[in-house]
Image (cartoon, helix red, strand yellow):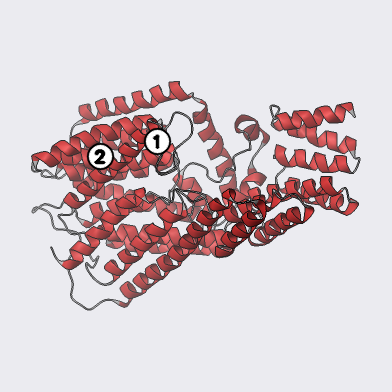
Amino acid sequence: MASGDRASGAVAAALVASVFVVDPGGLAPSGPARFAALAAVLGVGAVVVAAGVRRLEGSHVRPFVGSWSLLLVLIASSVVAGADRWHGVFGSSERNLGLLTWIGFGIAFFVGAALPPRSETVLAASATIAVAGLSGLALLERLGFDPTDTAWLGDRVGTPFAQSTYLAVALVVLGPLVAGAALDPTGRRPRRVAAAVVTVAGLSTLVATQSRGPMLGLGLASIVVLVFRGRPLVGALVGGGAAASVVGVSFARGWRSFGGRLDEWRVGLRGVQASPILGFGPEGYRDEFPRLVDAAYVRAHGSSVITDRAHNGLIDTALSSGVIAALVLGSLWLLIGRAVAARVREDDVSAPVLGLAVGVLAGLGQQLVLFPLAEIDPIIWMLGGALVGGVGATTSREPMTHRVGRTKPPLVWLGGSIGVAAMVVSFWWNLSGALGEHRLAQSTSFRQDRAEVVADAALALRPQSVRLAYATAAVHANGPTLLDLDEAISILEAALARHPGDPALRTEYVFRLVERARRSGLPDDVDRAIEAADDAITDAPMSPQLRGAGAEALLLDDQRDEAQEQVLRALELDPDDPRLQALADSIEKS
């Protein structure tokens, strides 16, 4: 194998291995450390592709160049037009789905397309190790051990992603490739046996996640591939099994989330209608949702968790970057689907390639009820590129890529340079965030004055982080004096200057102002709290938390009728909130 082939194979394997990158001592163990690792791997991938290890000139690959270029231009335009450009470029602390991450998705695709034709063995081995490791960690979580500090809540496993659905997505993407290796008659017996055992473990772990969307995506993908292979009866049986799993999980967890998806799509489509050309910018829906949501949604699903996704990949792309961007993304999915259809129809296609096709279709299909994931989508796009680029191509079919000499077109160098620069910036951004969050997590073990110093130093590493600003403000607010509270308020004000529409920051800011007004009793503080609450309620009229805080501020100014009105409207949205009920009782008794 040539050195260039080894390099592209190593990058692909490293992308799969990224699922294990965590920071157990960090504020968010499954967060910026993994994103930094992905940026580093994708930066190397951009170098590998741009340096001409393989030049993507095949007719099957060429349409993707234009589609990816157009999609990234549209996303960049939405960043410029958006209200929060920090989040637009880098993504939020929780999702990390800004422009730089989308550039990484494109790099991952072309890394996969640049793989040599016989790379399915490397991909299958990487997937087998990954699924075995994920299943092992899930078993440890079940047994009460959590070495990565990423266990999920309740009876659903989620390590090492701290989210059961993310784990399920990783399993449905990589698991079919492992199953294909187990069924490959040309493989060595020990490898086949190991792959079979890992396949069973992976399926068991998938069931333990209780995540219906990925299960449904896996079932549909299996049906599509089997039908194309001329085995509709087997496809129907597989589809029936997937449907039975979804129904079984629904009985265990309840059916409410199905209605929740419809509600999320309804509110999301309202946002698309409000800004159809360039959307709200990447991560901008998080800021706009409080203005778009209606009372029916809040009553049904509450408002304690900030909604930042519509749970549909195309709707979410339209919300972030406009309808045209969503259509371009859909065209990329269809182009990959066409490549999958062509591959699985080949008479002598191998079992690992069939598994690869199922995994890619499952990864894309589940996005109809989920959304793009910065943690896992690079793997999906890389595997999709591998299918398009000719991995597993037989002698009866020419690979879609071929070697070239040392001469490189200027556009290749330009695209590669942009990709490398983007990943360098992304690596720095996420590494500084990981270091800051790791340091901030340590502050809880210190006394108050030392904890504040450590928290400030952590925030200084990445002052643009909403999560760091929020947590650092909380550290200061725990202090005993008004000066501590004032410092917390100043930190929130600085964060709001960068992210003026962030709902978490705005709510916390109002809460802290009300707290200061209550503790000081000064008229100026009371007026300031009332004004901030009124402004926040104007932008988020369906927030019972903000209305409750506004009522507290009004009570401090002896405006009892107005306070009672706010509390009653808040209780209409969330009648079970004990804090609101206690506030309403205190007003009635006064």
Q: Residue 343, image x and y in percent? A: 20, 47
Res 461 seen here: yes
Is residue 579 positioned above or below 404 on the image?
A: above
Q: Dot 2 lies on which element?
A: helix
Task: Classify residue 582 by image quadrant.
Answer: top right
Residue 583 in the image: state x and y as whole percent: 79, 32
Amino acid type at image mark 2: Pro
Q: Which residue is mark 2?
A: 176
User: In the image, residue 160 lies at what x, y percent?
Assistant: 39, 43
Q: Disc 2 or 1, which lies upstream in sequence?
A: 1
Q: Is residue 346 above or below residue 561?
A: below
In percent of the image, x 28 and y 67: which residue is there? 49
Q: CA distance from mark 2 to mark 1?
A: 28 Å
Q: Nearer the viewer, residue 578 or 334?
A: 578
Question: Residue 190, located in which quarter of the rendered image?
Answer: top left
Residue 145, numbered circle: 1
Q: Residue at x 20, y 47 (%)?
A: 125
Foreground residue among 49 and 194: 194
- On screen, residue 430 versus residue 219, left or right, reads right
**Of 256 and 168, which appears nearest the observer?**
168
Amino acid type, label 1: Phe
Which residue is at 30% across, 25% downward?
Answer: 241
Give the quadrant of residue 578. top right
Q: Secondary structure at mark 1?
A: loop
Q: If the image is split into quadrants, where does the C terminus sit? A: top right
